[in-house]
Image (spheres, helix red, strand yellow):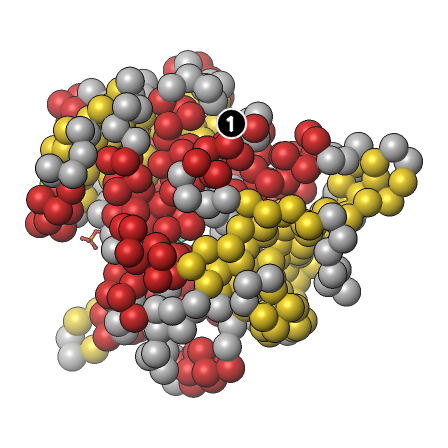
């Protein structure tokens, strides 16, 4: 079928690359390009001989558009799958525009100096992508990603109108460390130490960080404390799902994680303001990242399950209706299959699926689109096929 250029070679990319190699009929060739080429080479060496997919590697600084353009012109991919960090989204989109190649990512652009998750920078590219005749698929991970596909599916098959969505992200995994983050620590801590917010009647309502707490009994995991967070897909879903009155996002955190985070915050270690240290400018959060366990090393020691999904409330045929769609994923099963824990797995699998649907033409639509704007059915089928089967509950416990 075709060739994908995958940028980044961290936790999420590693899973997506394993999955592309399982799906070699579609991904006949992949090029893995990242800042540290040795990581790409190590993954290539691990996978070669286990797959028909032809793997090449390259070094690239994805902050530099000219390097990206040169690489894309050499590799000639059908799609670029951006699995580097949110800071690189715009440079990679610029390079895709210049080379007229489709673009897929899993997280929205964020400037280095403000931890504010908004689509406005990437949505500003809509017209340029339309004119170039290429597709940008934004947010093809789990959340954002599968949560948007679940919403589009519920809208298409289950409701005349969806009024309330609660997205619940539960990680019941235990890695045995007092404190570690399951994906890039810098991105993760920026996300959870920011103010919370949700959308009600078309307006953002802001909360203090971790101000709103609920307890929920998750299938496959059990009872967990969860907290309302700001999350990027709220912005696009509130626009794209008709009839929304309120949309919220909750994530589970254990007490130990929160106590450590509070302490780190209190001493200034989570700050993104640069400080001078022994004559050198450092960003405290980046320094913290350097001393925390590498998320990629957590796979072998993490046990337990994740449960992520959406509870929908709305109307069907004039009657009130509730509907819950979720996935349960087992950390150790993921580790056995691809050598990563479930957080990377639940992001890397949808990244591969999004790239596949764009590459094979199922989801091509010139412009810049969030995932819920596409027909959810082929993605839902692919989730079942590629390791993230979904479960329906027609009588879910609601969150008050
Ligand atoms: P990692 O830190 O593990 O990996 C990031 C990779 O990007 C590394 O290989 C890194 O290179 C590379 N990279 C960083 N900067 C550059 C650059 N300038 N040029 C080239 N390569 C670069 O992160 P994750 O795998 O955990 O996360 C990847 C993405 O997935 C992030 O955008 C994250 O926000 C997103 N995500 C989305 C989720 C979702 O559900 N939608 C959930 C979890 C993550 P090096 O090895 O040299 O550091």
Q: Residue at x 43, y 67 (%)?
A: 304
Q: In this view, does 316 lie to the left or right of 227?
A: right
Q: Is residue 181 above or below residue 20?
A: below
Q: Position of residue 318 (x, y in %)?
A: 91, 36
Q: In this view, does 105 lie to the left or right of 380?
A: left
Judge whether residue 31 can be spotted in this image: no
Quadrant that contains the C terminus: bottom right
Residue placed most toward the observer, 355 or 113: 355
Residue placed most toward the observer, 346 or 130: 346
Q: How many marks?
A: 1
Q: Residue at x 30, y 24 (%)?
A: 26
How packed mark 1 is, by other alpha carbons closer than 10 Å (few <14, some 14-19, many 20 or more), is some
Judge whether residue 319 can be spotted in this image: yes
Q: Position of residue 248 (x, y in %)?
A: 66, 56
The residue that label 1 is drawn on is 378
- Which residue occupies the extreme right position in the image? 318
Q: Where is residue 18 in the image (x, y as percent from the top left)?
A: 26, 42
Q: Position of residue 35 (x, y in %)?
A: 16, 47
Q: Residue 156: which quarter of the image?
A: top right
Residue placed most toward the observer, 124 or 316: 316
Q: Which residue is drawn at 23% across and 75% down?
A: 291
Q: Is residue 190 left or right of residue 370?
A: left
Q: Is residue 55 above or below residue 387?
A: above
Q: Is residue 226 above or below residue 376?
A: below
Circle 1 SS class? helix
């Amino acid at each position: 079928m075709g060739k994908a250029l995958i940028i980044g070679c961290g936790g999420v990319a590693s899973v997506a690359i394993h999955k592309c190699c399982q799906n070699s009929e579609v991904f006949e060739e992949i090029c893995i390009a990242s800042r540290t080429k040795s990581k790409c080479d190590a993954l290539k060496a691990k996978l070669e001989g286990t797959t028909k997919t032809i793997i090449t590697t390259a070094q690239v600084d994805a902050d530099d558009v000219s390097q990206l353009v040169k690489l894309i012109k050499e590799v000639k991919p059908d799609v670029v799958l951006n699995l580097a960090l949110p800071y690189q989204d715009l440079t990679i989109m610029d390079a895709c525009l210049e080379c007229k190649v489709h673009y897929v990512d899993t997280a929205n652009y964020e400037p280095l100096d403000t931890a504010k998750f908004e689509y406005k920078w990437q949505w500003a590219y809509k017209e340029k992508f339309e004119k170039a005749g290429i597709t940008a698929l934004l947010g093809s991970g789990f959340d954002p990603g599968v949560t948007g596909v679940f919403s589009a599916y519920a809208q298409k098959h289950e409701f005349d109108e969806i009024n309330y969505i609660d997205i619940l992200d539960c990680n019941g995994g235990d890695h045995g460390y007092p404190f570690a983050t399951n994906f890039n620590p810098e991105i993760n801590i920026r996300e959870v130490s920011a103010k919370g917010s949700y959308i009600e009647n078309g307006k953002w309502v802001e909360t203090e960080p971790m101000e709103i707490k609920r307890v929920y009994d998750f299938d496959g995991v059990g009872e967990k404390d969860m907290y309302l967070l700001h999350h990027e897909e709220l912005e696009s879903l509130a626009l794209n799902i008709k009839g929304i009155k309120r949309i919220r996002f909750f994530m589970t955190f254990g007490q130990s994680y929160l106590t450590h985070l509070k302490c780190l915050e209190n001493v200034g270690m989570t700050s993104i303001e640069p400080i001078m240290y022994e004559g050198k400018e450092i960003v405290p959060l980046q320094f913290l990242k350097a001393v925390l366990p590498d998320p990629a090393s957590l796979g072998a020691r993490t046990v337990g399950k994740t449960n992520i999904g959406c509870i929908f409330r709305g109307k069907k045929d004039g009657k009130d209706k509730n509907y819950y769609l979720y996935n349960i994923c087992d950390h150790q099963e993921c580790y056995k299959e691809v050598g990563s824990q479930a957080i990377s797995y639940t992001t890397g699998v949808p990244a591969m699926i999004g790239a596949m649907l764009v590459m094979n033409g199922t989801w091509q639509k010139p412009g810049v689109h969030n995932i819920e704007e596409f027909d959810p059915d082929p993605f839902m089928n692919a989730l079942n096929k590629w390791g993230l089967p979904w479960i329906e509950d027609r009588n879910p416990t609601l969150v008050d």
